Amino acid sequence: MLSLDPKKLAELSIPLGTGWLLGACMEARGKQDLWIRQKPEVLEVLREQAIIQSVESSNRIEGVTIPADRLRPVILGKAKPRDRSEEELAGYRQALDWIFSRKRRVSITPAVIQRLHTITQGGFSGDAGEWKKRDNEIIEILPNGERRIRFVPTSAKDTPKTVEARCRNYRDTCDEERVPPLLIVATFVFDLLCIHPFRDGNGRVSRLATTLLLQIHGFQVPRYISLERLVEEGKADYYGVLAECSQGWHEGSNEFVPWWDYFLSGLHRAYKEFERQVESTEARPAKSDLVRQTVLTQVGQFTLGDLVAQLPAASPQLIKKVLAELKKQGKVHLVGRGRGARWEVLP
């Protein structure tokens, strides 16, 4: 079963495929210090880009969006939030800042989970940081518009003691050192999703908890590559594995390997992207190089707007400049003019 029970987790055997993913992630963690020291000028760009993408993707998964021209100013703190949606994006950025600014190891307690919820709610929600007061359900909306109950989380009455038990089990399992830390993290996050402890914002808190726990165990990649963006890009897989592994969770009869594999695959993908971004960067300015790499990896026709969305850390002017350089070099071609203009990479 997939639940954070120290004794039962220690008795489980790890499948070969899961073990390979686990080993690949551990190997990447061993190399990350070298990558971080290698190109400090690139890291600055990656940090800003990851923050913007993480805030935007995590909130967009929950249906929270703001106009494109407000995105960077709100997230980077250059503009005050105007409405609830902007408050939530600004709150998520503040929660990431809180996580990344921790100098000492954080002990995982219910109070820490509540604090993440308080910050990411922007501090304006009346129940920010408070456990849900009513039972909730996870609803799936079918293509025909019909609503179906996909999962019934822990009851409001049992939520405080259940979160307390999971936090205690997390600490005990880590202290015993009989289970790989990444599997402990993955299992804790999954339990948190199944408990669904808040009225709103559970998905965002689970993603923040993921980043916090990974950092505690020395996995620094969320600082530079947005895990939230990777989740959003594979949103169907995310919801699919949640649905599969949550069946039988209350009874302790649910599957666990698919969730472990999904979690480890996402982390491994982030490290591969991090390695590629650092090691492929040459001596030219970092932002220009990131734009150049992004352009040359496009498939099919694309617009300037597509690139702006993919490169939040780069200005539209810089993107236009790089496109002009690549066009002059014969590497890209412009099709059409005006608003309908599209670019394509030449063979």
Image (tube, rainbow, N blue to C red):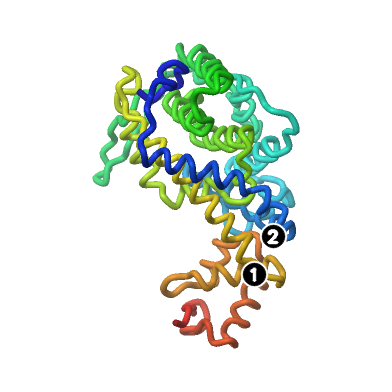
285, above or below 195, in the image: below
Q: Amino acid at mark 1?
A: Asp
Of 261 and 307, nearer the camera is 261
Residue at x 55%, y 23% (from the top left corner):
177
**Where on the picture, by quarter, is residue 330?**
bottom right
**Coordinates of residue 53 in the picture (x, y in percent):** 58, 52
Residue at x 69%, y 52% (from the top left corner):
36
> Dot 1 corresponds to which residue?
289
> Dot 2 corresponds to which residue?
42
**Coordinates of residue 303 in the picture (x, y in percent):** 50, 72
Residue at x 33%, y 34% (from the top left corner):
243
186, above or below 310, in the image: above
Residue furthest to the left in view is: 144
Instruction: Name the secondary structure under disc 1.
Output: helix
Q: CA distance from mark 1 to mark 2?
A: 9 Å
Residue at x 63%, y 43% (from the top left corner):
220
Instruction: Name the secondary structure under disc 2.
Output: helix
Q: Is residue 344 left or right of residue 102?
A: left
Q: Is residue 313 left or right of residue 243?
A: right
Q: Where is the C terminus found, in terms of image quarters?
A: bottom left
Q: Answer yes or no: do the residues labelled 1 and 2 have beta carbons within 8 Å?
A: yes
| Numbered mark located on residue 164 in the image | none
Q: Amino acid at mark 2?
A: Val
Of 110 and 277, nearer the camera is 277
Q: Where is the N terminus found, in terms of image quarters?
A: top left
**Coordinates of residue 317 in the picture (x, y in percent):** 67, 73
Residue 51 seen in the figure = no
**Coordinates of residue 157 in the picture (x, y in percent):** 46, 11
Residue 100 seen in the figure = yes
96, above or below 183, in the image: below
Of 186 and 131, nearer the camera is 186
